[in-house]
Image: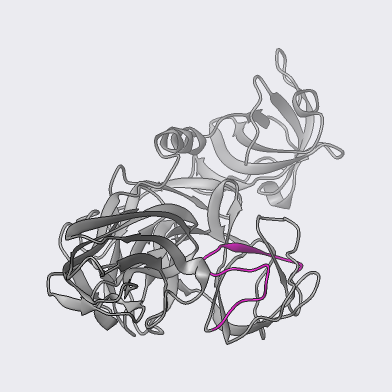
Amino acid sequence: MSTHANRVKMTVTSVASSGTGDITLNAASTGFRSFATAYGANATVDILITEGTAWEIARNCTYTHSGTTVSRGTLENSSTGSAVAFNTSGTGVVVSVIAAAEFGNNAEMAIQAVTPGGRLTTESGVPVSTSDRTAQSTLYYTPYVHNIINLWDGSQWKPITFSEDTLALGTLTADRCHNVFAFLNAGALDLEIYQWPQSTVTISNASPGVVTWSSHGLTDGDMVSLSTTGTLPTGLSPNVTYYVVNAATGFSLAATIGGSAINTSSAGSGTHTAVAQRVTLQDGRYCKSGDKTRLLLGSFYSAAATTTEDSRGACYIWNAYNQRPRELRKVDTGSHVINNVAREWNNGTALRATFIVGLPTRQVMFASSRIHPSTTSSLPYLYAYVDGAQGTEGGDSNDFVASAYSTATTALLLRAPFVASVGSHYISMFEAEFGSVNCTVDYGKTYMSLTQ
C-alpha cells in the first residue's frame, strides 16, 4: 500500500525502456523535498509524472532509496490513456508524490465499509428471510446494510461496490459443512465454495496427544471440532473448538490459537471424527488459511447432495457479518408415555432442531414440556441436550446441558447456556421416569435464539 508525503517533487536524470520504464531521480525542485528527505528508505508511493503537457499518474510505485529510482507501478491515468514515453534523458521531466484519485475514493469507501455490507441468503433480494426455505439449491450474497466489500487484490484491501451475486451449489457431499469465500475476479466480486475437511482420526495417549489424519493438509491455527461414538481421550471433549498446533504429518490440539498442546491421559474408545474449519485471522479478517484473497462471508450445511436449508427447524446458513437473531425451534403436540428407559423425546427425533456454527459462539438453548404425572410416585425428568445420542442419556457427559423434574402436573422450562463449537449441531430433549409409575407428557418444544 502506498505511503504519502507532502511537497515531494524532483527533476529526472533519465527514463529507462525508451521512456516508459523506471525513472532515475535527480534533485528536488525549488521549494520541494526530495524522496530521500521525505522517506529516508525504500517506499511504495503514488506519483505524477509530467513533461510539458504530457502527464501520467501511477500507483504503487517502488522508490529505491539506494539507487534513487522509482518504478512506474500501476497506470491509473494519463494524458494519452496509456503509458507515456517520456524523454529518456530526463530533460523537462518532473516527478511528484501525490495521493492518487483511486486512493482517495478507496479511502472514502473503506470508511463507509469497515465490514462487508451483505448477507448470505437463499432468497434472491431478501437478505433476511422470514419464511421456511427448504431444499434450496442456490445461495445469494445480497446487499444489506450497504453494498461495499473490502477484498485483497494481492497488494492491498480494495473496497468495491457490488450488487447481488449468485452462487449455484452444484453437486456437493451431503451432510457436510462448507464455507463461502468472496474474492476479486477481474475487479468484481465473485464467490466460491470450500468444503470443510472431515475424517475419522486416531488420537494418541501421549504428552502431547497427536492426531493422526491421513493427508490432512491443515496448518497451525486451523480450527478443529471432535466427535466420537465412544469416549474421547482424557483431556479432549466433544463440542469444543480446538486449534491446530505443531502441524506436520500429524498435529496436536490447543485450547487457544498458538497455545500449549494438550496432553492426553487415556486412549479413549470408539471411532473419533474430526472436522476442520480452515480459516484464520489475517489483517483482522477471517480468510481462508494461507490465502488472504479469499474472505470468509459465511458457512452453510448441505442437507442433501445439491441443497441446503434455512428454516426454523434447520438453520443451515451462517453469516460471518451482519448477523441477525433467528429462532430455531421444533414442537411436538402429541402425547406419549415416559417410562423408566432414558431416551430421546418419544424415542425419536421429533424435537431435534439443527444448526451450523462457522465460528465459536455462546448460545442459550431452551426446552419446555407439559407433564402429567399419574401419581405422586411418578418422578419424570427432562434433559436438554446438544448433540446427544438417541437411546441414552445424551451419550458423552459433555453433551449434557440442563435437566428438570416434577412430581405434579406442570409445565417445565429448561434454560441451558453453552458454547457451540464450529460445525453442525442439533439440540433436543431427552426423557426418563425415575419414579415407580410411568407418566404422560402432551407437549414438547425445543428452541433457541441464534445469531446468524
Q: Is residue 251 visible?
A: yes
The verdict on residue 163 being magenta is: no
Provide residue 446's location: percent of width, then percent of height.
Answer: 26, 63
What is the magenta segment's predominant secondary structure? loop
**Is 250 rendered above or below residue 330?**
below
241 within the magenta span = yes
Question: Which quarter of the figure has residue 438?
Answer: bottom left
Location of residue 446 with respect to 88 vertically, above or below = below
Q: Residue at x 70, y 12 (%)?
A: 31
Percent coordinates x, y for residue 336 in the rendering: 17, 78
Question: Considering the image in quadrants, where does the C terminus appear?
Answer: bottom left
Please state the horizontal and vertical placement of residue 319, each as a whole percent of the image: 38, 56
Residue visible at 55% across and 83% down?
230
Please state if 444 lies on the left or on the right of 237 as rendered. left
Q: Nearer the viewer, residue 321 or 166?
A: 321
Quadrant where the N terminus lies?
A: top right
Number of marks drawn? 0
Q: Residue at 50% of width from left, 57% of height from top?
A: 360
Q: Which residues are magenta?
A: 230-246
Q: Is residue 16 left or right of residue 270?
A: right
Image: 156 above or below 263: above
Residue 289 visible in the picture: no
Task: Find the residue positioned furthest to the right.
Answer: 66
* Position of residue 316 measured from the top left corner of the image (x, y, whole percent): 33, 67
